[in-house]
Every structure is written in C-alpha cells, then in structure tokens.
Image (spheres, helix red, strand yellow):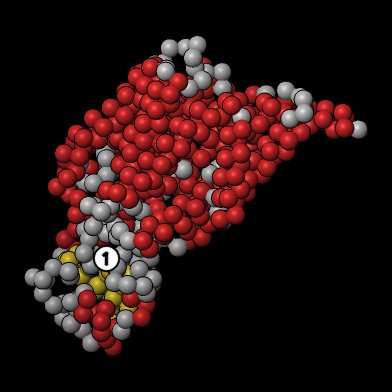
Amino acid sequence: MATLDRQSATTFALSLNPDRAAFTLLAASIVAFALAQLDLWPRNGFWIDEYFSLWASDPALPFGELLSERIAPDTNPPLYFSLLALVRPFVEAPRLAFLILNIAAIALAATFVFVRGRRAGMSAAALLAIALFIVSGPVLYYAPEGRAYLLGLCAAFAIAWSAASVTESRAQPVDLRWFAALGALAALSHVFAALFAGAFAAGVAIEGLIKRRFDLVRAAFVLGGSATAVFGVWLVFALPHMSNVAWIEFSVTSVREALWYVRQLTFGHVLIAVAVVAFLTFSARRREMRPHLRIFAVGMSLFAVLPVLASFFTPLVTGRYWLIGAPAIVVLAALALRAELRAAAAGGPDSRPATATAAFGAASMLAASTFSFVNVQAFMEAKPVWRGTPLVAPLLGDCAPGAVHVWENHLYATASGAPDSTFRDASRPDTPLLSASDCPVLGWAEHVRRGDDFTLIASDAELLSLLRIAVPPEDVRIVRHSSGFVVLSADATEGGR
C-alpha cells in the first residue's frame, strides 16, 4: 500500500509538470482574469489620478504638445501617459482605453517571460509564473486602472523573472541588451519600478560574486546602470515638480497602512501571507532554490528599506508604490512549486513530502488570489470616485465663463467635458464671492482632503464658504458624497435645467 501511495503521489506530481498542464493552468487563469474584469467593470469609477491621465493624454492635442506641456512636467515618468496618448485616438471610451493598454502590457510581459524561460529550459515554470501573475490581486486591481501601476508591475515581473532565469543559464551567454532594455523600461514606467530594478541588480551582483559568476555581475551592472541613467535624466525634469508628492505622509502609522495595503491586495489575509511565506522559506531546503532566495532576499530587502530611509527627506512610502514589488512573490512561488514537483517526480522517500509541500504551496497561492480578489472588489468600490461628474456634466451646456466655483485642481473640465473657462478656482484668494448665477451648478468640489467625512458632516454654510459662494442656503441644494459635493440652484433638475 505504501508503494502504491508513493507511485500515486509521483504520478500526480508528474501530471503537473508538462508544458501541456502549465498551458491548461494558464488558460484557466486567463478565463479567471476575464471574469474578474467583467465583475469589476460596474464597480469602477473615475477618480482624480485617472482624470489626470485623461488630461495628460488628450487626443485633441498634438502629441508633442502633450509631451512638453503635460507629461514631462510631472513627478511620474512619461512612458504610461505617452502610450495612453497613442492609444486613445483609436479607442473612444476612456476606461476601455485603459484596459486595452494594460492588457497589452500584461501580454508583452508574459511573452517576454515565456520566451526567456523557454531559452533557459524553464518553460513550464515560466507558464506557471504567468498564470499566477495574471490572477494576482495587484494585477486584477490595476488592470482597469488608468495609471502607471500596472506598467510598473509588468516591468517588475519581467525583471524578477530575468533575475531568476539568468542564474540557471550557465550554458548560454547572457544577453545584456535585455537587461539594458529592462532597466530603461522600469525607469520610464514608475519610480518604484526603477528602484525594483536597482534592488534586484544588487541581488544578482551579490549572487554573482558569491558564485564567482562574472556574467551575473555584468548583467547586474547593466540592469542597474541602465535604470539609474534613465532615471537620472528623468529626475532632472521632475525635481521642479516634487511638490506634487506633498500629499504623501511619513509616520509609523502611514508605514503600517502601506504594509496593510500590500498585504490585503497581495495575499488577502494575514494567515495566507504567513502560509505563503512559510512555503517559500521551507523551499530553502531545495538546493536549486537557494540562489533564487538569496537574490530575492537582497532585492526585496532593499526595495522595502530604501524608500523608508529616503522618506526622512522626501516622503515616498505608500502602499500603491510598494505594491509594484509584488510580482517577486509570484516568481519565487512558481520556482518553489517547480522545485517541489521535481522532487516529487524523482521518486524516493522525499516524493510524498514534496507532493504535499507542492499542494500546500499551490493551495496557498490559490487562496491568496481568491481572498485578495475579495479585497480588490472592496477597494474598487471604496475609491474616491468623482461622483459629482454624472450629475454636473449635463447641466453645464449654457453656463457662462467663471459660473462654477470649484476646489483646487484643474481637472473639472476634463471630467465634465465643459470648457476650462466655465470653472473658477475658489481656493485662490483673489476669487470673488459668487452671489448670483444663471447656471444651475454654482459649485463643485471633488477630492476634498479636510479630514475624514468632512464633506458629509460639515454644515451647508461651511461648504458654501469653502467655495466662496455667498448665496442663502435655502436657495441652493447641496449633493454630498464621501470626498466631494455639488452645489445646485434650488430649481435645478438632474439631467437638465
């Protein structure tokens, strides 16, 4: 009976190893990704960062003007906005343009990982990593999002895989061009993607020195050097605009909140995080995993610690930024699963424990994907969406210039489709009081950051004062939501005058 059980375990492990099984798993992941996006579509809405992306990629303006006047003068690298500007003339619906661009990025990253994996003799592991990546919480959440985070996740995925595959490619010369391209791509995608490239370059370099493999040292130098050089050029343009990140706070509480955010979207629950970390730690007993664990330990440690140190000078720590490093967990888990399945397939006394360990690891990653998606749904519904947009946009057709007082930012025209001249910034001290207007919309404020639930608990008089509207409260109707409000004339009707 023991022999039969061992043979059954080995047969089970073998059935999971071939490329055909990996392709089947990948197909299932693609279906799960599609179903997840269908579920998230009606839950989603536009918030300030996405309206900025639409403003920066306005198809009505020439690309050169967008690049010089809207994309370059920002604290975000230019690649995402530039690509979005190229996509939007062909895709009218903004949310669909976001999704198409992000799916294209996922497809390119997946193709890169598979091609490089096949050349390194790791095709099944590559397919497994891709399958885990596309159903991971961060990817599911940011795939429909109109920001650069998904692009950063894809860059980190490709870099983490390259760091893993290059250590197993002794028989083949290292193609340094790919490492140069990855470093540049990361630096142009997101600040933390550039940091990820540098951190993993350090991990690969240390592993190269330990093993006296100077091909690894050269690859690390090219990856880190490329990311640093391109990041440095971009930083010259970004430094004058560093006040744009003044919203980031740095405190013990903010760091804890960032870690909580990463845990919720990567693992779904603290117990699942413990299970995944335990599985990865236990994989160190496999000799083939030790180089990967050393590289990833160095890379992830630097990726976590350096932003904290930098935040003593300029706050940088936020959950969305740190989340860009999450693909490292996916890649390491795929490698650990491969190691356990190999041991199970080899037979011998370790076959059954290896099969059990692989099953535990697979179950942990499945649980992480499932429970993180529950959090994705909740996070999507909790976004600070501009809920005033569908109310205001139909009412602005005949409004005179300066008729609507708004709060602090320049994106109200992008959100509503009305001319810029319709709006007047009430946060400016030289803005006169609005005492009368023929426009059914007197005021509009979104992304109001004045403490928890300010827009819900403040009095009508306080909200009118905030927008410098000197009209008796009984002559207006104020529509509130958690991060904004709209001031309508008392006789205004939704959808028209």
Residue 38 lies, with reference to residue 350, above or below; the image says below
Please tell me which residue is depicted at 61% across the width and 29% down the height of the picture.
Answer: 286
Q: Amino acid at mark 1?
A: Leu
What residue appears at the point 20 percent right and 70 percent down from the top-left corner?
Answer: 405
Q: Quadrant of the N terminus?
A: top right
- How dense is the environment of label 1, judged by Cα within 10 Å: few (below 14), some, or many (20 and up)? many
| 357 vs 19, nearest the viewer | 357
Q: Is residue 245 left or right of residue 25?
A: left
Quarter of the figure with residue 402? bottom left
Q: Specify the farthest residue to the left.
A: 430
Image spot of residue 138 (x, y percent): 48, 47
Q: Which residue is identified by label 1? A: 396
Residue at the extreme right: 1
> Picture quarter containing residue 46?
bottom left
- Asked if residue 267 shows in the view, the reply is yes
Q: Nearer the viewer, residue 266 or 97?
A: 266
Q: How many marks?
A: 1
Q: Position of residue 362 (x, y in %)?
A: 65, 40
Q: In the image, is 118 to the left or to the right of 313?
A: right
Q: Is residue 114 left or right of residue 177?
A: right
Q: Quadrant of the C terminus?
A: bottom left
Q: Is residue 495 above or below residue 158?
A: below
Give coordinates of residue 59: x percent, y percent. 27, 42
Q: Is residue 325 left or right of residue 370?
A: left
Tell which of 247 and 49 is nearer to you.
247
Location of residue 271 with respect to 334 vertically, above or below: below
Q: In terms of depth relative to the viewer, which is nearer, 122 or 284?
A: 284
Is label 1 in a helix, a strand or a loop? Answer: loop
Residue at 19%, 43% in the rendered image? 238
Q: 255 above or below 112?
A: below
Kindly identify the residue that appears in the image at 30 percent across and 42 percent down: 191
Residue 95 appears at what percent x and percent y?
Answer: 41, 48
